[in-house]
Amino acid sequence: MSHSPTGPVAAQQPATGKVGSPAGATGAQAIWLLLGAAFVTILNETVMGVALPHLTADLGITLSAAQWTTTAFMLTMAVVIPTTGYLLQRFTTRQIFTLAMALFSVGTLLGALAPTFPILLVARVVQAGGTAMMMPMLMTTIMALIPADSRGRFMGRITIVMAVAPALGPTVSGLILNAFSWRALFWFVLPIALIMLAIGLLRLPNVGEVRKSPLDVISIPLSAIGFGGLVYGFSTIGSGAEGGLVTGGIVLAVGALGLVLFAWRQIVLQRSERALLDLRVFKSRPFALSVSLVTIMMAAMFGTLILLPIYLQNVLGLDPVTTGLTMLPGGLIMGLIAPIVGRLFDRFGPRPLVIPGAMLASGVLWALTRLTEDTSPALVTVAHIGLSLGLAFMMTPLMTSALGSLTPQLYSHGSATVGAVQQVAGAIGTALFVTVLGVRSASAAAAGASEVAASADGIAFAFLMGAVLSLLAVVGAWFVRRTPAT
């Protein structure tokens, strides 16, 4: 893939050195800024879940309508992320960061001031548009600046953003809502976003090279239909609404067709270097395997994040704040251990980490199939900690192995692919767990079980589906190998 040494390229050259070189200090500042910005933006993906009852009371809407504050966020992420592979090659790092944080800040301000639900929904879409650019930009920057033998510890910090931020969202939201209105969820974040935007405008260096490649306008709607259709279809199925299974199935079929057409067009455009999302990343066996395992584990994580709060509140009778605090240790431990896992990866490679991580995560999911209406909340906390540890031992090695197996020209497209997969996997996990929960609970209730007992039985059976799925990750973990340095 050729790069034209035009003006924008020259503007980016000073920061292309690896961290540890003369440009290393500047590169490290860029990475820390991007890490902080990505954490703040992605945290907002899950903060609205706890606020739904407050929205229904304050704005006079139904619970299913309020759920759209989360669904619309995920849907926008799924639509925008596939385009970031192109954007990161077409525009400078500072330009993309400025656009992302400006969108996020505008959306946050709009959300804080929203007088009606439609405006709040628009605010969430604008927020998500900025958030979608952050993770691929962070991954691409790390791959460009960090030497191959040190990437693990930096990618470990990405795990904090990718996995811990969504996990902490409900806890942070619960603590804020315990003392303030739902608007405080936006007001608390706004000054942080504006400060990061100002720092980025003044200090963020440009990384990598810019190519003046044309935009294929046909690929954009195909991408939106494909990825958006999958996320919306699975979300509709997982909502449990009447007719959701039929509607979700139709949307899934349309999304699958759109994704097939999108993939076909990208393959055709690869010959002219005009692909919106370069699918040559899947020619790398380590990338394809690692992304497959990430999909399984992210589905398990998001499904668990949905089920455990339902179990703690509806079965054990805990309030939202206590529920958030019960799940807080798992998220914190994942954040603390992720950088350590990264250092271990740099020294020992992926297999000694991924294999025990997959076994631990799978073992915890099997243990969660034993949940009853009498299980102690402390045991739930321990199980969540175990699952978090297992995921932490998998995510950093898998993402580093995946992106490390690509050529530098494909880093941005690989990062965009990982981001898109995360959104689809989250929707799949939510739909699978919630749908199984609903079907099993209804069956138990029809057999004469009480509402609480039926709910407990449905949740345990949903975890059984997740546990069976996790066995694929256990098998796949044995085939992960250290990738050659690039």
Image (tube, rainbow, N blue to C red):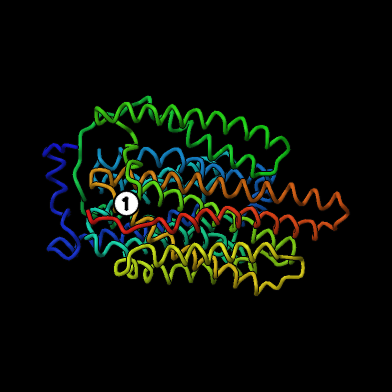
452 left or right, relative to 425: right
Residue at position x 31%, y 38% from top?
280
Q: Residue 104's spot in the image, x, y percent?
A: 41, 48
Q: Where's residue 138, x and y in %?
A: 32, 53
Q: Decide if residue 99 is on the left or right side of residue 356.
A: left
Give the image quarter of residue 324: bottom right
Q: Looking at the image, which is closer to me, 464 or 471?
A: 471
Relative height, residue 393 to residue 420 (above, below): below
Left or right, 472 with respect to 418, comes to right
The residue sitting at 40% across, 42% down in the picture is 81
Label 1: how many residues lie within 10 Å, few (<14), some (14-19) or many (20+)? many
The image quarter containing residue 240 is top right
Q: Is residue 124 visible from the viewing direction of this image?
A: no
- When the figure is inspected, residue 49 is found, relative to residue 64, above or below; the finding is below
Quarter of the image that includes the N terminus? top left
Who's the residue at 20% across and 33% down the image?
212
Q: Is residue 277 visible?
A: yes
Q: Position of residue 43 (x, y in %)?
A: 47, 57
Q: Position of residue 100 (x, y in %)?
A: 36, 46
Q: Is residue 137 above or below residue 264?
A: below
* Identity, as a three-letter code, of the amino acid under mark 1: Leu
Judging by the rendered image, the residue that carries numbered circle 1 is 403
The picture quadrant where one finds residue 232 is top right
Residue at 64 percent across and 40 percent down: it is: 237
Residue at the far right in the pictured view: 448
Q: How many marks?
A: 1
Label 1: which secondary element: helix
